[in-house]
Image (cartoon, rainbow, N blue to C red):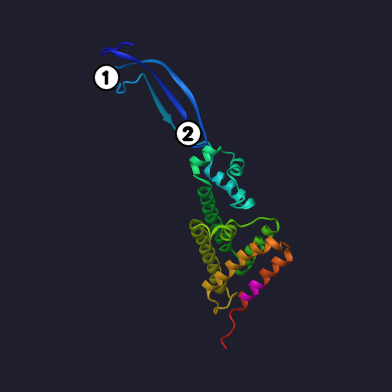
Amino acid sequence: MNQGRGTRETKTAIIFGTYSPFEFSCTKIWIVEERRSCENVRSTSSSALVLMPRPKEFDPEEVLDRATRQFLSTGYEGTSVQDLVEATGLSRSSLYESFGCKHDLYLAALDRYREREVTRIADQLAGDGSPLTRLRMVLEQTAAACEEGEGCFLVDATVERARQSEDTERCAAAGLRGMEEAFADAVRRAQQAGEVPESVAPTSAGRFLANAYRGLHVTAKLQPERSALFDVINTTLAALQAGPDPAP
């Protein structure tokens, strides 16, 4: 190599890949001898190592949806990192780099589920037609999903993790508030349509209906029969239409 002020030859290794405590995966591409001006070369080393992150080749939202299905199937404690690797199709390094640890992935999946589920219920309740009929429709669709073994991530997270994780508790509580507000708005519309007595307090009724929604999911774990679930729905809506008992 010429050591003067003219030029020097350098060999550069460019590594495309990602590093995690679990694995290091990369592809080395050696760039052949290249002449560069000494004035433009700051390093005195004959080779330079450049690390470049591997571009993401997956849809993060799809990964969260797949993780949600896994957590719904086996719960937080019953889900291993290997289960998540197989469910999402990502390597361990990609999961940790993109979503953090299992707990972080769980929270991200739960938050996405919360936002989508609250929005779905609110949109269904706000549709055209009789507000009371739409209330029944939402509850009956919930019962049908329970019959098919489809759970609610927010309910499961509340039961399994809310006491152990403040982050889980906050997310589940936010979902509960969103559902209560959606049901309360539906009660106000039903009152305007003359389907629910004005004596009913919408906020209290919203809590009552959100509790019925969650109760269907819990009941279905032991009594998934349609008759049991529809008993809950019919009694809930009858109580809503009857209004509060008169003061003694």
* Residue 123 image-quadrant placement: bottom right
Q: Nearer the viewer, residue 86 or 20?
A: 20
Closest to the observer, 224 or 19: 19
**Looking at the picture, does residue 83 appear above or below residue 164?**
above
Q: Is residue 3 above or below residue 53?
A: above
SS label for mark 2: strand
- Mark 2, other Cα within 10 Å: few <14 / some 14–19 / many ≥20: some
Q: Which residues are magenta?
A: 235-239
Q: Nearer the viewer, mark 1 or mark 2?
A: 2
Magenta-drawn stretch contains 100 = no
Regarding mark 1 in the picture, which secondary structure is present there? helix
Q: Is residue 89 visible?
A: yes
Q: Which residue is mark 1?
A: 39
Viewer-side residue, 9 vs 163: 163
Magenta residues: mostly which secondary structure? Answer: helix
Q: Residue 191 vs residue 238: left or right?
A: left
Choose the circle earlier in sequence order: 1 or 2: 2
Q: Going 49% across and 41% down the picture, which residue do you hit?
A: 98
